[in-house]
Image: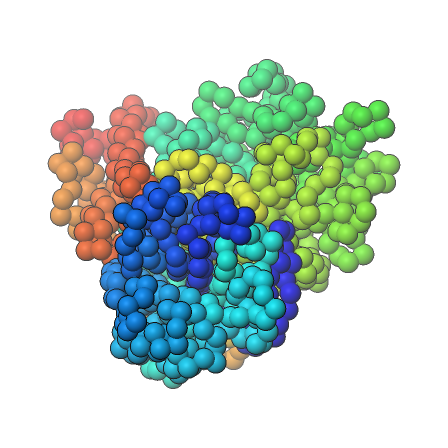
Amino acid sequence: MRMSLLIPGLALALCTAGFAAGESPTLRVATYNIHHGEGSDGVVDLDRIAEILKGMDPDIVCLQEVDRNQPRTGRADMPALMAEKLGMAVAYGVNYRFSGGEYGVATLTRLPLLGERNTPLANPDNKEPRGCLTVTVRWEGREVEVHNTHLGLSGPERSAQVTDLLGIIRKEVPTLLLGDLNEGPDAPGVARLREVLPDTWQGGAEAGTLPGGKRPRRIDFILASPHFSTVESVIHDTPETRTASDHFPCHAVLQWRGDAAEREGGGVFEGRHFQGEGNLEHLRLLETAARMFRPDPEYQNISMLYTPVWNGFVEGPTWGAWWIQNSYGPSYCAVPFLEEPLTTFLQNAQDLWFAHIGDGERRGEKGWVGPDGCLCDAAAPSLVYYKQGDGRIDIHDWGMEFTAAGVVMQAELLLAGRDPAAIARYLPLLERSANFIETRRDPSNNLFLAGPAGNLLAPSYAGWKQPDGTYGMAYLTGLSVTYIAALDRLIELEKLAGHPEKAALHTERRDLAKQGLPLLTTEEGYFIKSLDPDGTRHGVYGAEKHGYFEAVCNHDAMAFNVADDAQARKIYDKIASIPGLRPHGVIITNYPGLDDTYADTKDWLWSFGTWVNGGHWTTAEARMMLGYHRVGAYEDARRAMRHILGLARQFRMDNPLTEFGAAVYQPKEPINCVYDNWGAPAALIRGLFEYLYRAEGLELRPHIPPDITRLDQRFPIRFGTKRLYLSTTGSGPVTGVEVNGAAWKNFDATSVFLPHSETPDTARVQVLLGGAAARGLPEAAAPELPTVESLPDAYAPFRELHARLRDAGLGDCYEARHAGLIVEYFAAIEARNKMLAEGTLAKLPEASQAAADKSYTDTVEKLAEGLRGVLKARGDSENPRDREIAAMWRAVSGGN
């Protein structure tokens, strides 16, 4: 099927194959003859080449006509420059030397680059030398050979070179051939290659890869072995590509079909964290998502965001505080499966907000005195911002939606933990925050008023611009949605605490707030952004004024069940109908650009696609991914995860992502690491079962992709002090449940309920789908510490402390898990060094590689510093257990 797809700044010819995407892993590849960077305007400009390629989000790029040290291109090292601009590893094949420089092809990849070789091709007429650059990459646990070539200009020359290529190609392995073949698809040489490696282009013969000319010519190709099928193939014919080079770039998204044995049987996956059968790509993505919450030698992992200053998480190494907006998606999504010490790290971070909760007297940054119950944008031990601190702060409102989101996160943490002491400590604070939000309820319509920057993704919302040019309060949809989600959880906490009267109060407040939602809903079923008191609506897509679509309040309504199933489907359908909302596979905040901010959108920070006006935030993507799971849009969730993994592989997990989600916010840093990005892996895991914590128990709502027929989570889910190990068998509606091998009656077609009082302390829950029979379940993964050959003497006491606590029956306590995490981190460092030495882990550009390696040693040093501080303080505790642990530490550490 051929169609035209239009996204901001990009018009392209797109061809998609006629089968369901996402049935197995996909690989994005691109080829581009860059004409040594010289465009039709005579300007050599690699930046525009790089920007074009970034828009394709490729895993592998093959470039032809690439100079190195050539006078005509300023003696530039083009392969190295392109690698730096794209954040990829590079291999360069030199085919021709002249003018004291080199000329050839370059292959770049964000995958591990395992090997490279450049093979000269036949040159019967002694013309320009040609070659084939072959690289081997590791993708989804497999080795893939990628050939990059640029064939000659004459027919006899190409015929001889094709013969050489056929001798290089190994039919039995997954293989790609990309490049400028200098002849059309039906020409003799290409026809011979296509017999071995099918053409990925699915479009018509009218397609061409050369700008200009009366007759289109397609001479640039992506050929792939039968291990792959084509999901989409694209020739990028845009104003930018017509100028940048004398060829159009092409990209293809390839789907893994498997080798012969794999295609005939089902895909079986056996990982440390997940096991299953069916869609191997999805299972591998789940495994990788779980890895990102443990020390891992390959991917950036969440412990890299630890600070000993407050023994908890920090937004990022360059961000010395803890933000509500940025942590909302990752924290909410991770709560069910976080274990110690990560739960303590998260609680200590959130404590920064509640330690500074507004009381009408405490003075924060900028001299702001927060009203009672007001939470913040961000906080650290010695600072708090009760308002958004960027923009026109003189007109900013208090953090209204910040406060509601903070209540959601803390309440969710309490519901999962079910600790009476913790609930008693925090519940009064959460009640104060709810009372603060209630001061903004308009009783005439049960909507909530907020002024400029009172929204979650502040300061994208300017409130109500009044006739005199000042900005006042308007009814903010996000505040209603997030507050309803907060009240849902406060109701359950009050029940759990034995406060029926307060539970009834919150129920009344929630139900009234829901009554106001129709005023914020369009006829198509999605939510607007805000409603001015004079009736002006902001965020009616396609309207002449304020006609953008606001994504945040809509995907949050899906994620937190503020929208019912029917409305959630309507919201998703609207999002899916607007390609500009997801130009790179991840959601941006709004589309098109905002016309109702108080700022000049010509300024870079405020420009469309950069920050809070059409930029991408992975904390928001997390909630979007929960929405995808609710409506069964699993390929959308996979696409988002792939995009974030591309950043993780390059140690570029930054937020926001600028250029509509294509570029990092701090590109001059050697690496980036920001908490927001963990929203995607957390959502991919939480989305499987949704996890609705109630006072009486836990409701599971399975959202398992239909092409996964067996799934085992090998890690526990938190349910108070109980631990749940979840599995599914079959596909379709819930038709049966077993708990520890016994039949369970509390389920319906869409959900399973586990009353806390009836659920075993360790419960192996098997959900049977579509009439499937029960099966034997694998053993849960044992939490054993890895062997570390090179554990420094200074860190050996942590391993000994872990052993003593385990032997004392305290192996699951925070201190034991923190000590174990330090040992696990050293094991990850050992494994990483080994992979680098063996060449099985792709190296980053030099400065980035050094910074990435240092992030591992920095993390383990911080973890050790933090635990030492905690254990020292335990010695002065009034708690006998704390003093016992402190004594153990003194014994194993020599009193240090």
Taking depth in this image into account, of 212 and 46 the one nearest to the observer is 212
Judge whether residue 453 can be spotted in this image: yes
Q: Can you say which quadrant of the picture contains the C terminus?
A: top left
Instruction: Tell me the quarter of the picture where residue 16 sits.
Output: bottom right
Give the image location of residue 168, x and y in percent. Answer: 27, 74
Q: Is residue 673 above or below residue 229?
A: above
Judge whether residue 431 can be spotted in this image: no
Q: How many tags in the picture?
A: 0
Q: Is residue 806 above or below residue 105?
A: above
Give the image location of residue 787, x and y in percent. Answer: 17, 51
Q: Is residue 549 above or below residue 534?
A: below
Write the residue at 59% across / 73% down: 206
Q: Can you say which quadrant of the picture contains the N terminus?
A: bottom right
Give the image location of residue 247, x and y in percent. Answer: 50, 60
Report the side of 560 relative to 94 (left or right): right
Write the residue at 76% across / 31% down: 473
Write the residue at 71% across / 30% down: 598
Write the residue at 84% across / 24% down: 468
Taking depth in this image into account, of 690 and 9 the one nearest to the observer is 9
Give the image location of residue 356, x and y in percent. Answer: 53, 24
Report the side of 169 relative to 582 (left or right): left
Q: Is residue 36 above or below residue 269?
A: above
Taking depth in this image into account, of 583 and 449 the one nearest to the observer is 583
Report the colour scheme. Answer: rainbow
Report the side of 630 relative to 761 (left or right): right
